[in-house]
Image: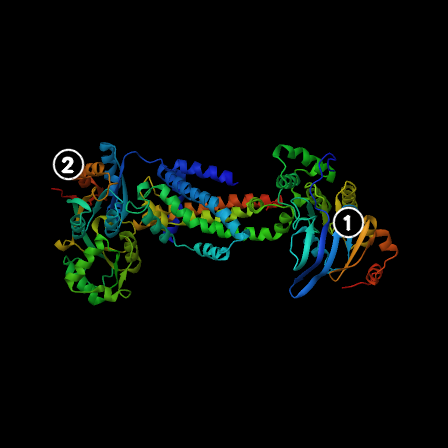
Amino acid sequence: MQDFWAALAQAFALILGAEAELVEIIGLSLRVSLSAVAIACVIGLPLGAVLAVGRFPGRLALSVLVNALMGLPPVVVGLTVYLVLSASGPLGVLQLLYTPAAMIIAQTILVTPIIAALTRQVIEDLSGEYDEMLRAMGVSRAGMIATLLWDARYSLLTAALAGTGRALAEVGAVLIVGGNINHVTRTMTTAIALETSKGELAMALALGIILVTLSVIVSACVMGLRASAARMAYA
Amino acid sequence: MRDVAEPPRPGLWPVTLRAVAFRAGGQTLIDGLDLELAPGALTCVMGPNGAGKSLLVRLIAGLIAPTEGTITYGSAGAPAKNRIAVVFQRPVLLRRSAAANLDHALKTYGMPRAARPGRIAALLSEAGLTAQAGQAARLLSGGEQQRLALVRALAAEPDLLLLDEPAANLDPQATAMLEALIRRASSEGVKVVLVTHDRDQARRMAEEVILLHRGRIAERAPAQAFFENPKSPEARAYLAGRLLL
Amino acid sequence: MIRYLTVLTFAFLGAVPALAESFIVVQSTTSTQNSGLYDAILPQFTAASGIEVRVVAVGTGQAIKNARNCDGDVLLVHAKAAEEKFVAEGHGVSRADVMYNDFVIVGPEGDRAGIAGTSDAKAALTKIAVAQAPFASRGDDSGTHKKEMALWTAAGVDPTAHSGAWYRETGSGMGATLNVATAMGAYALTDRATWIAFANKGGQRIAVEGDAALFNQYGVIAVNPVRCPNVKAEAGQAFIDWLLGEAGQSAIAAYRRDGQQLFFPNAR
């Protein structure tokens, strides 16, 4: 408990001090995780929508697979991406290992199934309501997917939020492919792991408190946006 | 509503149902039905609950396929795009503003972006919704929502307009406004098939009546003949309020 | 929305490759990083050479594996036998001693095994085994773990037979293992540098030190550019030369925590 209060005090001191190093770490965390979520949205939203309304063989199997991949262990993803990006791996020539780009790739792999699976669910529900009307209007299947994605946009924010939470919180993948290099690939979570291994538990906890605060701010913004959309009957 | 100079579009007509049956869950819901629809009179489809009225609308619109029999549109097996429009009992409006709902429809019907604002304004004005253009469609009143759904359907400039109990949930005033819009479309040359279980509405609107009973056509007659001198026992029972499924 | 997301994506990605023009990757150990040594000496090298040094701090075993995969320009670890094998197999150019310190056995206040204040590591481990006193092991094939296993072998004890009982393999880094030892009141083998810098000592203190068998030598190896064409051989060699030269050696000697010197340069 003593550690906890020390951590709380330290967290405030860190935030008030706004040390350049802390700002850098938070900035990198956000940059990596939000980039990964953005790419995962570009892939996962259409993928989820196609799984919801598409008609092709293997659709059910693919849905099951995507659902299962939601629980991918970050360390496994990290290891796989490491092996692929390693200088002796197939994409070694790109020299991406131990860079933020490698971390974005790993987190994109982690987050995409979450976004796709949640999108599938949301779009399936909305499609139940829209399907007949859109078909009566003669909307093409691509048009249907676009319409459903747009009209579900505020519900889909929640999917993106879930993905952001996963990305910001995971440490296993970014630690392996980023290497936790100071000033280059050190994020909130890898810094927490490092401080813990240095026995600086209060410092680690303080960083944790800041991370949780960040998550709260991000989700509060999204929920606020959703609530105002709901008032407009858009969500 | 349509520009007279426009060349006639290739044949939707006649819409012909031959021995059409639809079965689901071990039940026969439409049972060997023959029907031919041609431009002209406003047709009301009536019948007790479960007679198959809504199914008939969906079959004609091509939204479901018959279990048996054939439906042809002129010489084609499927209706050409945008020739048939449907308005359902509960309007399904997009989670957007009234104007954006129409924009989406016009885009679907292939109208270029630049031409849309003018057309949207005209449609909104026709529906009496000019002041509500920017409002969320789902926050409009029931009558306003249904009028919006109706002009959205008309925006396709269809030859055949199928209405599935569009006024079922509306109060008399909203119903009157909707009926005025329907009458206007009919007078401008759109073939209207109006499903209703409301005999008063049918008396007001119908030029021709089709009575459905147990998935078959029990009687088809001009409105006046149907209401004043029904031929079939089903029609007599129905008008006396005694026909149940 | 998709258009917007795409734009956003490229905006982010565009910001990513803000990488230094000239840098090397050093595969190294947690002990050197956690002790704060790199934070102290690397800026001096960068100032002198213009080369940024990026340290990936993992266990010695994993550092060697990563270097074997060509994912690093320089290897700086502490497991002489494994290092010499790495060079012999052609993965490294050559090996040189950089610095040393020593390992210590830390233990709880209660000292169930009764080893506090002794200096014979072999005897101390035997006593721990006999007392079945809890012992936290790295269990991760790191340099420290290799040293620990060598000491057990010398003591004629196979602790892994008791794994899960009094012998606990954490499979984690030095700091994480020390956290476990503190929480459990267990003995543990650690390098002195990590111990001095470690902030969560709790009731733990040094029990055994000063045995010649606890000597801890760090070596540096340039990854072989013939095997790994991507290796920045020149910059890597510049770092090694600096480290083994007067500037690097005196920087190592000058690094202190709580007034104590953590590493002793011994390049020849």
Drawn side of residue C185 relative to residue A9, left or right: left
Element type at mark 1: loop
Q: Which residue is mark 1?
A: B171
Corner quadrant of residue C250: top left
**Could you tell me residue C161's position as x and y percent?**
24, 66
Depth check: give the residue in front, C115 or A122: A122
In the picture, the disc for residue C246 is: 2
Residue B28 drawn at (x, y percent): 69, 64
Is residue B200 found left or right of B16 in the rendered image? right
Quadrant containing the C terminus of chain B in the rendered view: bottom right
The residue type indicated by label 2 comes to: Glu
Q: Is residue A55 left or right of residue B49?
A: left
Asked if labels 2 and 1 share a chain, the reply is no
- Residue at horizontal 41 percent and vertical 54 percent from the top: A72
Crowd class of label 2 (few under 14; some 14 to 19; many from 20; radius 10 Å): few
Identify whether C213 is placed above or below B84: below
User: Which residue is more in the foreground, B8 or C268?
Assistant: B8
Q: Residue furthest left?
A: C268
Is C253 in front, or is B117? Answer: B117
Q: Chain of mark 1?
A: B
Relative to C21, say whether C140 is above or below: below
Instruction: Indicate the quadrant containing the N terminus of chain B: top left, top right, bottom left or bottom right.
Output: top right
